Image (tube, rainbow, N blue to C red):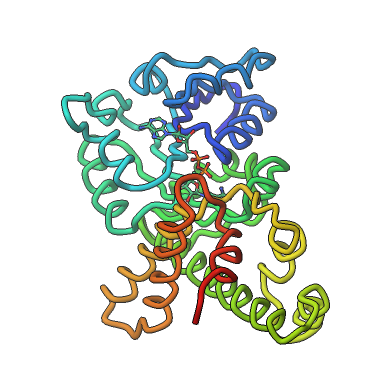
Amino acid sequence: MKPSETKVAFVGLGLMGLPMAKNLLKSGYAVAGFDLNKEVATKFADDKAFTFAASPAEAVKGADVTILMLPDSKIIDALLWGANGSPALADGLAKGSFLIDMSSSSPISSKENKQKLEQLGIHFVDAPVSGGVKKAIDGSLAIIVGGKKEHYDETLSLLECMGKNITHVGDAGAAHAVKALNNYVSAAGLIATCEALNAAKAFGLDPHVVNQVFNASTGRNNTTENKVENFMLNDAFNSGFALALMRKDIQIALSFIEGMNCYANLAKQCFATAKEADEKLGKGADHTAVFDYVRTQKK
Ligand code: NAD
C-alpha cells in the first residue's frame, strides 16, 4: 500500500489513535480523521496531509483503508451498522476497500462484521495492538493480525508504520481473541502483583525491594518490570490505559474461554476484581490504580 496512492480514514483519535494516525502521516499517508472529541483536531494543526472530518461518513469518503481505534465492539457495531437513527458507516465504505479494526474488540463481533462487510465487497482485517501509549508514539506496537493471508500481505506495509512486531494469527476475529487472552494474562499478573506487594508491605517489607526481587526471580512480569515503579508505588496511576478498558478486555477473554467450554476459574476472579475496582474508583481511573483499590480493601 503505497502512501502516495492510499487514502486513510481514521476513526477514534484518543490516547492510542492519535499517535498511531501521526505515524501514518509521518510515513506519507494522507489521513482523514474523526473523533467525537472535536478538540483533538488542534493536535494536527501542523499536519498538512490531515483533515478533520465533520462526521465518520465524511472521513471514509474515497478512503482505501478505514482504521477504527475505538473503545469497544458496542460502539463499533453501532457506528458500522447504525443505531438510534444514526446512519450506517458501512454504507459509505468503498467496494474493495479495507476496514481495519485496531481496537481491542470482541472476536465474536469481529467475525460477524467480517461476514457482513464481505457481502458488501469490503475486506475486514482485525489488527489489535499491544504496548500502550509509549509504543504507539514511537511506532513500536506489537500488532496481532486476523483475516485472509492475502489481506494481511496487502496491509502489512501500512501496519509497519505503527508497529514493529506484526503477527498474522488466523482468520478474521482470531487476532481479537488472542489480544483479549493476552490482556487477561497481563491483568492476572497485575492483580497478583498488587495483592503480593500489599501483603509484603503489611508484613513490614519495603515493596520497592520486594519488586526488585520479583524482577530477578520467576515472579517477573510486565507489571513488575514496567508499572510498579513508574505508576504504582509513586501513586501516579497514569499509565494511559484505562481500568474500564482492562475490565472490558478481561470480560471478552472470560466470555471467550467459557464459550470454548474451558476452565476459567482465575479469569472469573480477575474479572470480579477488575469490576469491583472499576466501580469503586469510578470513571477515568487508570488500570494501575487497581493497586490503590487492593490496598484499601479489608480481607
Ligand atoms: P481512548 O478512550 O483514549 O480513545 C477512544 C477514542 O474514541 C476517544 O477519543 C473517544 O472520543 C472516541 N470515540 C468514542 N466513541 C466514538 C464514536 N462513536 N465515534 C468517534 N469517536 C469515538 O482509548 P484508547 O486508550 O485510545 O483505546 C482505544 C482502543 O485501544 C481500546 O479498544 C483499547 O482497549 C485499546 N488499547 C488501548 C491501549 C492503551 O494503553 N491505552 C493499549 C492497547 C490497546
Residue 81 horizontal side relative to residue 127, left or right: left
For the residue pair 283 and 183, the one nearer the viewer reads as 283
Residue 195 percent location from the top left of the image: 59, 78
Name of the residue lying farthest toward the left: 85
Residue at figure coordinates x 36%, y 62% from the top left:
252
Q: Name the spot of residue 196 as percent of width and height, x first.
A: 64, 81
From the viewer's perspective, tell me whether residue 85 is left or right of residue 18. Answer: left
- Residue sitting at 48 percent across and 29 percent down? 10
Where 40 falls versus 187 (above or below)? above
Q: Is the N terminus in the top left, top right, bottom left or bottom right quadrant?
A: top right
Rendered residue at 48%/58% (across/down): 246
Give the quadrant of residue 264: bottom left
At 37% from the left edge and 47% from the top edge, which residue is drawn? 72
Q: Is residue 32 above or below residue 131?
A: above
Q: Nearer the viewer, residue 188 or 22?
A: 188
Image height of 151 relative to 218, above or below: above
Q: Is residue 14 left or right of residue 90?
A: right
> Is residue 9 positioned above or below 115 on the image?
above
Using the image as rendered, state which of residue 57 and residue 213 is in the foreground.
Answer: 213
> x and y percent of residue 146 in the render?
43, 56
Q: How many marks?
A: 0
Give how far across and how far down residue 50 sits, in percent.
58, 17
